[in-house]
Amino acid sequence: MTIAPDRPAGRTHWTDAQLLHALEEVVERELNRHQGVAKEWMPHEYVPWSQGRDFDGLMGGEAWSVEQSRVTDVARVSLVVNLLTEDNLPSYHHEIASMFGRDGAWGTWVHQWTAEEGRHSIVMRDYLLTTRAVDPVALERARMTHMAEGFESDNSHSMLHSVAYVSFQELATRISHRNTGHNSGDPACDRMLARIATDENLHMVFYRNLLKAALEIAPDQAMRAIADVVINFRMPGHSMPGFERAAVQIAVGGIYNLRIHHDDVLQPVLRHLKVMEITGLGPEGLQAQQELGFFLEGLDTQATRFDERQAAILARRQAAQERRAG
Ligand SMILES: [Fe+2]
Ligand SMILES: [Fe+2]
């Protein structure tokens, strides 16, 4: 893809305010497209309420214990990480409302997106508590700790960095929910997470299309933003209690790891935007594009090493299981 040489004469650097203004029309078009394809859905329909019963405490019911949980060990870890991530919505709303504003098409998107995201924590918590999939006391304590920390974006200094980040992050969330469902061992959980993943995909498409327009308007700056975001990417839940340990279990369990991050999150967005094929960049854009190329090669190599380690761990686990069984 060659960038048409119709940039405003003499424009060397776009400010965030100029970009927000220049992209407003694209936001309006994408918002209309989004509203045409996003289907209404009801969180309560995804919860098997008949499996629910009172807990101990005020209701005098039965306390939670792990044998009550029907989901797999890795899904139990991943569901909590994913729910706590969704729970931090007030902080995300604050971040994007501060960056994109609350007026016009940008504001409409910010509020629409926030309302849609709200469904995700509602349905997940209802499912988890009704089916006794996770420890409700540990979940609530982790939510308090995580939310009380707040979330501060790594990209709040730049509008283009913010748009690039959410393009990848929404897809990362989609893949993480989808793979958790597939590995949960419970068809009801799988169906609920597939529904959430559909929302996340539409969010990704919105931001990715916006990023595409930004690449056309301000190619060098957008390329720099994409390179920075890909190179420094970390999930929004990275600050939650026990994240590192959970991330290892989630990686080995095949829900989210370097291979998945490279193949199913970074590459689809980069390929769709033809980021590595864009020509006609200035020195800043060209340098960013080259850095991105080097980084992706290195990441692919690291992902291959991870694949090998993962295969070895899984083979050891399998052998230990067979020894126990035999
Ligand atoms: Fe979400
Ligand atoms: Fe989302």
Image: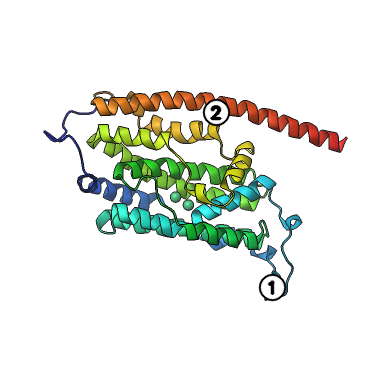
Which disc, if any, is residue 110?
none
Measured from the top left, where is residue 38 in percent x and y? 41, 52
Quarter in which the N terminus is drawn = top left
Q: Is residue 41 visible?
A: no
Measured from the top left, where is residue 53 in percent x and y? 70, 68
Which is more N-terminal, label 2 or label 1?
Answer: 1
From this view, report whether residue 295 is shown above or below residue 32. above
From this view, report whether residue 196 is shown above or below residue 300. below
- Mark 2 element type: helix
Residue 8 placement, left or right of 148 = left
Q: State how many labels appear.
A: 2
Measured from the top left, where is residue 132 in percent x and y? 68, 60
Picture quadrant of residue 18: top left
Quarter in which the C terminus is drawn = top right
Type of residue at label 2? Answer: Ala
| Residue at the spot of label 2 | 303
Tell me which residue sits at (44%, 27%) in the image.
Answer: 296
